[in-house]
Image: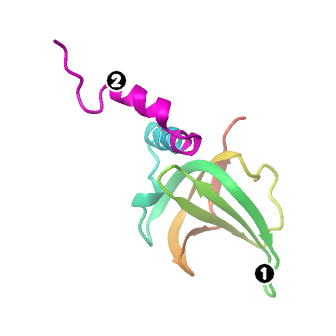
């Protein structure tokens, strides 16, 4: 008689069949983070220079009194970080649903995880 290991093929298959779309999407994004060697957002710490990868959930232009900002929420399956470009109204290719990799110093501001003026690379597609 063959026993199934916890976390074995059958358990993973059953979990995928019963999981909702957002859970499956988060698992796929976490797998992409592992594959690329980037840090999961949930493991990033204030002050570290990090490289994160994921999908943009939202992009918002925020006019400010001093400097306009473009803010994009990047989700990697483990958590979200807000990418903030100061002095920008729009960046071609930065749009919801787009996948990208970003690098910069991880910070916390007003209770949010942020990276200011990150280096970024858009993924194909």
The quarter of the image holding the C terminus is top right
- Total number of numbered discs in the rendering: 2
Mark 1: secondary structure: loop
State the image coordinates of residue 37 (x, y, percent, origin top left): 44, 43
The quarter of the image holding the N terminus is top left
State the image coordinates of residue 124 (x, y, percent, origin top left): 70, 35
Color style of the picture = rainbow
Q: Which residue is mark 2?
A: 9
Taking depth in this image into account, of 58 and 92 the one nearest to the observer is 58
Q: Which residue is mark 1?
A: 67
Q: Residue furthest top?
A: 1
Apparent side of residue 11 relative to residue 22 in the rendered image (left or right): left
Determine if the magenta segment contains residue 15: yes
Mark 2: secondary structure: helix
- Real-space CA distance between mark 2 and mark 1, rounded to the nearest whole angstrom: 52 Å
Q: Which residues are magenta?
A: 1-25
64 w.r.t. 81: above or below: below
Taking depth in this image into account, of 100 and 117 the one nearest to the observer is 100
Q: Which residue corresponds to the image point at 38% horizontal and 30% vertical from the top-left?
A: 12
Bin the neighbour count of mark 2 within 10 Å (Cα to Cα): few under 14, some 14-19, many 20 and up. Answer: few
Bin the neighbour count of mark 1 within 10 Å (Cα to Cα): few under 14, some 14-19, many 20 and up. Answer: few
State the image coordinates of residue 41 (x, y, percent, origin top left): 47, 58
- In the rendered structure, which disc, 2 or 1, sits on the residue that comes first in sequence? 2
Q: Residue furthest bottom?
A: 65
Q: Which residue corresponds to the image point at 53% horizontal and 78% vertical from the top-left?
A: 111
């Amino acid at each position: 008689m063959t026993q199934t290991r916890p976390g074995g093929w059958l358990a993973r298959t059953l979990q995928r069949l019963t999981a909702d779309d957002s859970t499956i999407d988060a698992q796929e994004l976490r797998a992409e983070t592992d594959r690329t060697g980037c840090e999961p957002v949930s493991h990033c710490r204030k002050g570290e220079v990090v490289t994160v990868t994921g999908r943009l959930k939202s992009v918002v232009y925020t006019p400010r009194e001093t400097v306009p900002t473009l803010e994009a929420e990047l989700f990697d399956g483990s958590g979200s970080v807000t990418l903030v470009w100061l002095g920008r109204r729009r960046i071609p290719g930065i749009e919801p649903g787009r996948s990208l990799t970003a690098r910069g110093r991880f910070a916390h501001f007003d209770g949010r995880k942020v990276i200011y003026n990150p280096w970024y690379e858009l993924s194909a597609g």
